[in-house]
Image (cartoon, rainbow, N blue to C red):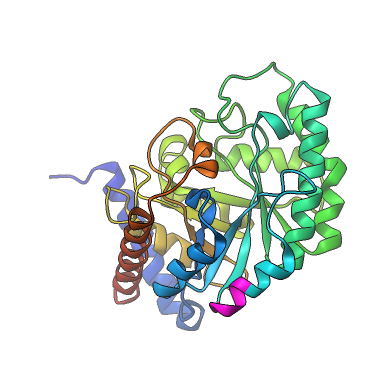
Amino acid sequence: MSLQRVDQWRAQIEERYLAARAADPGRFEPRLSFSWSNWGFGLEPLEASCDRLARSGIELIELHGNHYGPDLGYRVEETLRILGDRGLRVSGVCGMFSDDNDLSSNRPLSQQAAIDYIRREVAFTKAVGGTYLLVVPGAVGRPQAYDASELARSSAALRLVADEFTTHGVLAAIEPIRSAEVSLVHSVREAVAYIEAVGSAGVQHLNGDVYHMQVEEPHVALAVIEAGDRLVNLHLADSNRLALGHGSMDLDSIIMASYLIGHNAPGRFVTAEPLGPGAGPYAARTARPDPAVLDALVHDSITYFREREDAVRAL
């Protein structure tokens, strides 16, 4: 029986992975840097979230970008103390963009809110030692476009604040999101086009998400390869957006693709973000979580990821 196309793609990726590793084994020695995005933990105190990650041996955290106003969000010194006491470091900050702070909005006040929000988050990311700030070109949870000018408005608004990334040494990581959740920029190719439309040295990188890729790309691992050097972070969840190992996502191919593009280099991360299925996940930001559910989510994800990374490295 002939192979399905998906199996052919997997075989091609494995062949490329093995050939590249044989040609330059030293490049494949460092492991992928595994982080966890904590905004899905909702109203749980940061101390409790960090305790959970530390118990599972996770040393990196992607912090919720919760500086929605000057009086809101994590405080730098307190955050660094909480993380330091538990041996955690910051990979980056997950920027949150809704109708309230929408770069593509046809309401200037919402655009201004997005610009001000980015300024606060870039400064915070730098202060806590993060590498990147995730930026979404349009509002999450609004899949219907306002009009045909969203990309032009969004790219122009981000251009106004792009120098902040260069000044602070923080990477702007543009995230493509599935069309069920946002109205523009759904794929790696569209994200690159958006970056080119912004036209700034401060905006050059991507944040991938395998859950969105499985919908908007022909093949998740091939999309990782297409993103290449632009990819600074890759969000991980299984095919049902649950813990890794609880769905049908081909994690081995994703791991091989990540190694192929050199994503195991310093300053590059894979970050678990299992949010559960649904059209709009942002409600989790302000919900009270069940600690036992989160404990299992973290334990299962990191255990399965390490198991599959070991298997790939043993090929």
Q: Is residue 97 above or below residue 273?
A: above
Please name whichever residue, 14 or 282, is drawn nearer the observer in this view of the structure: 282
Please name whichever residue, 55 or 280, is drawn nearer the observer in this view of the structure: 55
Please name whichever residue, 198 or 84, is drawn nearer the observer in this view of the structure: 84
Residue lying at 48% horizontally and 28% vertically, measured from the top left: 180
Looking at the rendering, the stretch of residues picked out in magenta corresponds to 82-87
**Residue at the extreme bottom:** 26
Magenta residue check for 38: no
Task: Indicate the position of residue 140 as horizontal and vertical percent values.
Answer: 58, 33
Task: Indicate the position of residue 301 as horizontal and vertical percent values.
Answer: 35, 61
Residue 82 seen from this side: yes
Q: Is residue 104 above or below residue 287?
A: above
Task: Indicate the position of residue 263 as horizontal and vertical percent values.
Answer: 53, 66
Residue 266 seen from this side: no
In the image, taking residue 241 as reference, residue 35 lies left or right, namely right
Please name whichever residue, 207 or 125, is drawn nearer the observer in this view of the structure: 125
Classify the position of the C terminus by image quarter: bottom left
Magenta residue check for 85: yes
Q: Is residue 313 above or below residue 151?
A: below
**Residue at the extreme left:** 1
Quarter occupied by residue 267: bottom right
